[in-house]
Image (cartoon, rainbow, N blue to C red):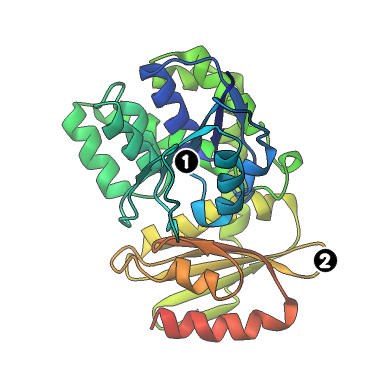
Amino acid sequence: MVNYDVFNGDTDGIFARHQLRLAIPLDTVNISGVKRDVNLLRHVKPAKGDLVTVMDISHAKNRKDVLRILESGARVEYFDHHDPSELIDHPNITYHIDTDPHMTTGRIVDSHVNGKNHIWAIATAFGDNHFDLAYELATAEGLDHEKTKLLKEIGLAINYNSYGKTEKDLFAAPLLVSEMLEDCGEDVFAISEHEIFSTLVSNFRSDMSTASCQEPYSIHEKGVIYKFPDEEWSHRIMGTFGNHLVNSNKDLACAIAVTNSDRTYRISVRSSLNNPYGAGNLCKAFGGGGREKAGGINNLEEGDLDKFKNEFGKVFS
């Protein structure tokens, strides 16, 4: 029997997987990728009796492959916080899905393992831009200011590293980051001692500085849209910069549109923190996806940017 762990390459996916395996150890074949590579289940070629554990990957985007895996006789356990669309009624699948806007996959896993190594789930809250919740959880855990600050930096830096178009844009492939976590065992703060983490933090600060110097493309009453060029820094920073914008003004929604090499746009959308709804449905209308609080579009046609701008204004008015 083969055990597959399939997880998103951002903080939430990587840390959820690590917390699960700290509590429930298994020898696994690991599959991950950049944050926007949500069709990861296509890589799984299971046999009868195999176990496929999925974390922080859209069920809606992978439903055909979930069916294929179940038809092979394999078992599936699904942990996620995105809108799953239509669930599958099958005895070999177990769902752990919660689409609350303030939920993370890490927190779902945290509940599943009864809070074992709970601090890892707090890092996913920081990485997924639930700062108020993360601070609240850190205080309840008894973390002092310095440890909380470091945990936030860990969550943000690893999440930032997940946003490239391909793994070539990243400073460390998600599977390499996952291996780094395995070296740390139960101690999340040991991440700060790794050379990979130092590289991520320094480049995160540099890319944020570059993004902060850009001028807005479109300003709305309760939202702002930025348009970035097709450069490595822009693809890496787009999600984290969007999080920064909505944290700077909790009534503000935002979208970051980055030009692709084929003149389409890759777009990252954030609902405002005070009204965390609408991002996922907006993106679905243009062929993308996501959840209430955050969503994305991989390939928006150049001629549809004005239409997107108008719909953005309507959704976040």
Q: Residue at x 60, y 52 (%)?
A: 64
Q: Residues within 10 Å of mark 2 (few under 14, many from 20)?
A: few
Q: Position of residue 156 (x, y in %)?
A: 47, 41
Q: Secondary structure at mark 1?
A: helix
Whether residue 125 sits left or right of residue 303 in the image: it is left
> Mark 1 is on which residue type?
Leu
In which quadrant is the C terminus drawn? bottom left
Q: Residues within 10 Å of mark 1 (few under 14, many from 20)?
A: many
- In space, the residues marked 1 and 2 are separated at their CA atoms by 29 Å
> Mark 2 is on which residue type?
Asp
- Whether residue 149 appears in this view of the structure is no
Q: Residue at x 52, y 13 (%)?
A: 183
Query: Sequence order check: which comes first, mark 1 or mark 2?
Result: 1
Give residue 156's mark: 1
- Whether residue 30 appears in this view of the structure is yes
Choose between 34 and 126: the one closer to the eye.
34
Q: Which residue is mark 2?
A: 262
Q: Position of residue 10 (x, y in %)?
A: 53, 40
> Can you say whether 307 is above or below 86 in the image?
below
